[in-house]
Image (cartoon, rainbow, N blue to C red):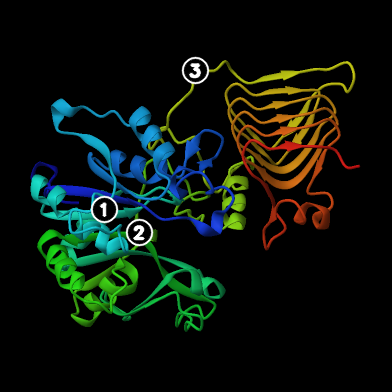
Amino acid sequence: MLNEGHRPRVLSMVLAGGEGKRLMPLTAQRAKPAVPFGGRYRLIDFAISNLVNSGYRKIVVLTQYKSHSLDVHISRTWKLSSELGSYVTTVPAQMRRGPQWFMGSLDAIYQNFNLIDDERPEHIVVFGADHIYRIDARQMLDAHLESGGGATVAGIRVPRSESSQFGVITVGADSPRILDFQEKPVDAVGLPDSPDEVLASMGNYIFSTELLMDMASEDAGNEQSKHDIGGDLIPRLVERGDANVYDFTTNVVPGETDGNRHYWRDVGTLDSYFEANLDLVQPEPIFDLYNPLWPIFSYSRNLPPAKFVADWRSGDPGVKNSVVSAGVIVSGARVSNSVLSVGAHIHHGADLENVVILDDVEVGPNAVLRNCVVDKNVKIEDGAQIGVDLDADASKYTVSAGGVVVIPKAQAIAPPV
């Protein structure tokens, strides 16, 4: 670790402009980083919390699509001390370089060179806004500086069958230098010591400022480029021998244990989003929200504590292996392996298993829910069923490849006829 009295100047950029098409209908009315998660958080809270906990508190969030709820959330949640020069601020596409939206993640940085000029950082941390994980970015910066390279990419092993979802990294045997980088290859070659795995980019980068600005400027004039960090910039830096990988498994976060260390989830699909939520509910979860040494911060509504009520019609509530948020009332219902977000009300006789309920959902008496995600402000009427008959559900709602039923916001779900 570098001498804390001589830390380099850093500006953090969080890329929050993606459309999130694979998360539809959860992204029908909100940006992907604003999608609720884990009962009381938004996806973007994890990236920003990691940066703030790492001591990097000059953070700009680059937004674009359907950003209103994301802007509101950040303005309510992230009020850092301006007197100490700290801030988290959203920056929409301002068309500073011409009448066009951000054409890619690299173009988003290029169009916001003014932010870099204002802060004059020595290094720029660039994080994606839609992953679930903990990382101490200071340790990644130390590795970046020690490598002597201009760019560092955080890497983690994932199954080779998932390689088409990630940037895939090839390194030498005894060096962090990246020898090859392929964006979402269909037929990636497995690792020498583990043929069924590949080394994937986590979408987290650190760049030396001068190099990033030079390369982004050069890319802006390339009409063949898609102006993307993973698809365009990193391969060019690899050709120059100027990109290194940071092994995420070397990162040590205070408060983590062997059972939940080095967890990372890309929640880019409905199935991965659903699975990541259910990763939270086990008695010893593989991602632990209850780590006071590295908290995940978010906005909290002023709600009373959760309440469990015995109901004479259906007996005591039975709740096991579930996350239950503030303002939730479970009244004589059965809830198993589920996430109940703030303000939800589960009435007597309802039966929920493997369910992710977002804010202010009302589940009526004797309703049955299985393997589903229910978006905000949905009213599920008495005796309604979700996830019981997938063919019937598919005719009305989105059903993921893994069989997860997703109910859009503010729907009224009637019982079967």
Please give the name of the residue rendered at 40% of the width and 47% of the height, measured from the top-left corner: 134
Q: Nearer the viewer, residue 302 or 70?
A: 70
Q: Amino acid at mark 1?
A: Gln
Q: Amino acid at mark 2?
A: Thr
| Residue position marked by numbered label 1 in the rendering | 139
Q: Nearer the viewer, residue 225 or 194?
A: 225
Q: How far apart are the two marked residues, 2 and 3, measured between alpha carbons?
A: 39 Å
Q: Secondary structure at mark 1?
A: helix
**Crowd around label 2: few <14 · some 14–19 · many ≥20 (10 Å):** few
Res. 302 mark: 3
Sequence-earlier tag: 2 or 1 = 1
| Residue sticking out furthest to the front | 99
Sequence-earlier tag: 1 or 3 = 1
| Residue position marked by numbered label 2 in the rendering | 250
Q: How far apart are the two marked residues, 1 and 3, measured between alpha carbons?
A: 36 Å
Contact between labelled residues 1 and 2, with CB atoms less than 8 Å apart: yes
**Crowd around label 3: few <14 · some 14–19 · many ≥20 (10 Å):** few
